[in-house]
Image (cartoon, rainbow, N blue to C red):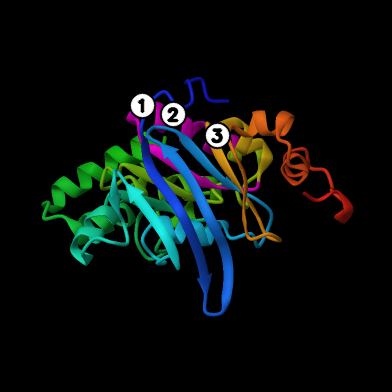
Amino acid sequence: MSSREPGSTGLPHIRLEGIALGYGDTLVQHDLTFDIRRGDVFVIMGGSGCGKSTVMRCLTGLLEPRAGRVLIGGESLWEVQPAERSALMRRNGVMYQSGALWSSMTLEENICLPLEQYTDLAPQQMRAIAEYKLALVGLAGFGDYYPAEISGGMRKRVGVARAMALDPDTLFFDEPSAGLDPLSARRLDELILELRDSLGTTMVVISHELDSIFTIADDSVFLDAETKTMLATGNPRELREHSPIKQVRAFLNRGEVGPDERV
């Protein structure tokens, strides 16, 4: 569980106002309005197919909303010029579910990729940054290894290191615990909290893993696949006990809600 006081950082770092999302004729989510506070671990949760990854695509600048605004530090992500949007997106780092590492590259080379793309640093400087980022995730000295030579949990950590290469304001995690054994998942949760506490980075995490949610989340939003909208926001531990919405309590207690009980 996080040891810091949720919401202690004041004004929201990211704000969604009336967001609607979809693909073609399919509506995925609508009427999404919530804040993500700077320095929080914010979890986007809900059952399979509710649109968690779609919301993350919107937040990271990959999917334009059908309606509404995404404000990052007060700037509207989808109303600025493309060059300004690109600059806003560079302030994000993303750790994908699989780690998304290039198998033909060493861990150091993987981490250097965003540095090569977005900076004019000399190779020696990039290598030094890669070594530092690997040390931050507990993998000092592993730069010359290839992804196939390390465990799944370690590959996830390298994915985190690469996401941090450009010192982002916000780190996004897509199901970080997926495919990990309980011990590796716990270590990754601890890493997320350590990085948040030491760097002050805002963390946005997609997850349906309750152990992880209760361990790391300061705040959250619950998305519902049936109504295609958000049903609740707040600290998951508090929602588990006090939410008036049966679907939310059922999800957070791993229970089932019958059709006649749905709100």
State yes or no: discs 3 and 2 in contact (Cβ < 8 Å): no
Is 242 on the left or on the right of 66, as rendered? right
Residue at the image point whose x is 65% and y is 29% from the top: 237
Total marks in image: 3
Asked whether 242 falls inside the magenta stretch, the response is: no
Tell me where the magenta segment starts and ends, as one range. Answer: 186-208
Marks 3 and 1, how far apart at CA: 16 Å
Most frequent secondary structure within the magenta stretch: helix
Give the amino acid at mark 2. Answer: Glu
Residue at the image point whose x is 15% and y is 46% from the top: 125
Mark found first going from the N terminus, 3 or 1: 1
Residue 118 position, x and y percent, is 19, 58
Q: Describe the element under mark 1 as helix, strand or loop.
A: helix
Name, please, the residue furthest toward the bottom. Answer: 25
Give the amino acid at mark 3. Answer: Ala
Asked which quadrant contains residue 1, the reply is top right
State yes or no: discs 1 and 2 in contact (Cβ < 8 Å): yes
Q: Describe the element under mark 2 as helix, strand or loop.
A: helix
Give the amino acid at mark 1. Answer: Ser
Asked which quadrant contains residue 67, the reply is bottom left
Label ID, residue 198:
1
Label ID, residue 194:
2
Label ID, residue 167:
none
Residue designated by label 3:
217
Mark found first going from the N terminus, 3 or 2: 2
